[in-house]
Amino acid sequence: MDDELFGEWIDFCAGRSEQEGWYFSGLLQGVTDPDTLAAVFASFAHADALRTRALDVLAAGEWGEHLYLQPATVGDAQARTTAARAWLDELAKAAGAAGEPGLQATLREVPVVIAPAARLDAAWRGSGPADYLHDVICDVVREARTVETPQVNGLDEVLYHIASDLYLGWYITQPLAPTAIDFAPYLAFWRLGGRGALVEGAFLVEADSLES
């Protein structure tokens, strides 16, 4: 860890700095030490739970030579499909609670389809179902947050940049939004190399995402 950046993080969390949250984006890249994680989370509510969840994510991946954490193993297509179904079931519950019955029905009924990475990338670049679902997830989490401060926003930046994955970050901060989505099924999906996108008529799961 960059000691100077860590010192600035401590000042930021104590309200002695007005840095933008993005400034701390690289704070935890490559970090695995539990004591370091405890120090990063020390000023937040549920600090012990945040540390435990961060360790859950780190245990599911590896840094290797990568800038961002990568899943440590790859499940076969059937395992990823099963994990995707569990994640969709959780999303369906959240959509229903958010007053989105149409989306809820889609998430319950849509088939899981193995697809090449290029098709998922196209889905994420567009403004279709994948984008709409993402917006709903964001709204659910933000409305369920028990506290919203510059420090929490900064923490979101720090955790997003562990794996370049917003949902893994929200798995870690779930104690700060206890009535929102349970991101544990997403972690289970991700740790198998799962990457998915909702499109018209299907939930796409990337084929052999870590084997190419």
Image (spheres, helix red, strand yellow):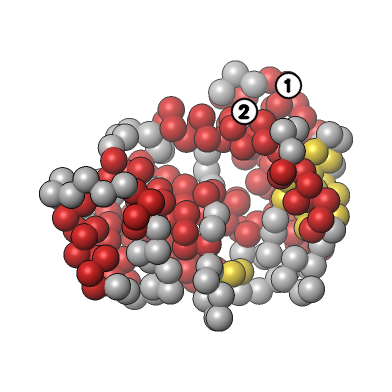
* Residue at x-position 24% and y-position 58%: 9
* Residue at x-position 69% and y-position 59%: 194
The residue lying toward the viewer, choosing from 165 and 73, is 165
Q: Earlier in the sequence, mark 1 or mark 2?
A: 2
Q: How far apart are marks 1 and 2 (CA)?
A: 9 Å
Give the residue number, with chain letter if any, for mark 2: 95
Taking the image as shown, residue 41 lies to the left or right of residue 211, namely: left
Taking the image as shown, residue 40 lies to the left or right of residue 30, namely: left
Provide residue 1's location: percent of width, then percent of height.
Answer: 32, 74
Provide residue 24's location: percent of width, then percent of height.
Answer: 34, 57
The residue lying toward the viewer, choosing from 114 and 52, is 114
- Where 48 falls versus 100 (above or below)? below
Provide residue 53's location: percent of width, then percent of height.
Answer: 42, 58
- Where 137 falls versus 72 (above or below)? above
Count of labels in the image: 2
Outermost residue, bottom side: 65
- Contact between marks 1 and 2 (CB within 8 A): the answer is no
**Quadrant of the image for the C terminus?**
bottom right
